[in-house]
Image (cartoon, grey):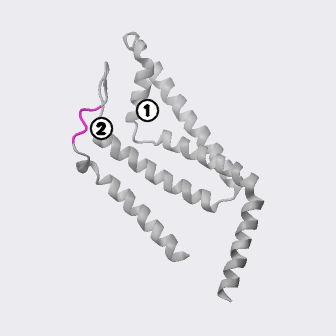
Amino acid sequence: MILARITLLLIWIAALCGILQAGPYLGDLGHGICGPWGCGPPLEALTVYHGFWLVLIGGLTTAAIRSCSAAALRIAGQTLTVLGLCGLLGLTAWELAHMTDTMRPYAVRRCLFVLATQVDVPIVPATLAGIACWIAGHWITGHGEKLRSSAQRGDDIARDVVT
């Protein structure tokens, strides 16, 4: 059991390191995302950083779902979801407050551009992780007895095989 966990941890760390090294292997994806406000960073960089955040947060979310109680998952899920939505609202409010009149027709595109090029803080992956934890917490609550009884049957079968 411990060897399997260490192996999974090493694979996850290798995936994190590997995704950061993937930029040169992506080739030329063309110029960055452009709009009337100018162009953003190269698509290769955006792909690598968004991939890093998804692998990092996806691994942590998977570990939390596998090891935390339903109540802890619901609380963590609600907290992450609310923080993520506050981040989205804050980013949108900031952009709208600092937008000139000539840029108002492009408000939605500009907000999506800023969200897509935001790699410093993983707003979208954290929000998705929160939703996943929240759903998992509710699912475990509804199916907990079934899971426990099937796990107990599995332990009984394993004990019978060993003896």
* Kind of element beneath mark 2: helix
Left or right side of 139 for 51: left
When asked about the image quadrant of residue 106, the answer is top left
Q: Name the residue under label 2.
A: 43
| Residue 62 spot, x, y in % from top left | 55, 56
| Residue 94 spot, x, y in % from top left | 47, 25
Q: Residue shown at 37%/10% (left/top)?
A: 102
Mark 2, other Cα within 10 Å: few <14 / some 14–19 / many ≥20: some
Q: Is the magenta stretch mostly helix, strand or loop?
A: loop
* Distance CA(mark 2)–CA(mark 1): 14 Å
Which region shows up in magenta? Answer: 28-32
Compared with residue 90, is residue 101 higher up or lower down, i.e. above or below?
above
The amino acid type found where label 1 is placed reads: Leu
Q: Residue shown at 48%/29% (left/top)?
A: 91
> How many numbered discs, if any?
2
Q: Name the residue under label 1.
A: 115
Q: Residue shown at 43%/28% (left/top)?
A: 112
Compared with residue 136, is residue 91 higher up or lower down, i.e. above or below?
above
Q: Residue shown at 37%/35% (left/top)?
A: 117
The amino acid type found where label 2 is placed reads: Leu
Mark 2 or 1 closer to N-term? 2
The answer to if 103 sits in the magenta stretch is no
Left or right side of 157 for 116: left
| Residue 48 spot, x, y in % from top left | 34, 46
Task: Kindly report which numbered mark, 2 or 1, lies closer to the viewer in this rendering.
Answer: 2
The quadrant of the rendering that contains the C terminus is bottom right
Query: What's the mark number on residue 85?
Result: none
Mark 1, other Cα within 10 Å: few <14 / some 14–19 / many ≥20: some
* Kind of element beneath mark 1: helix
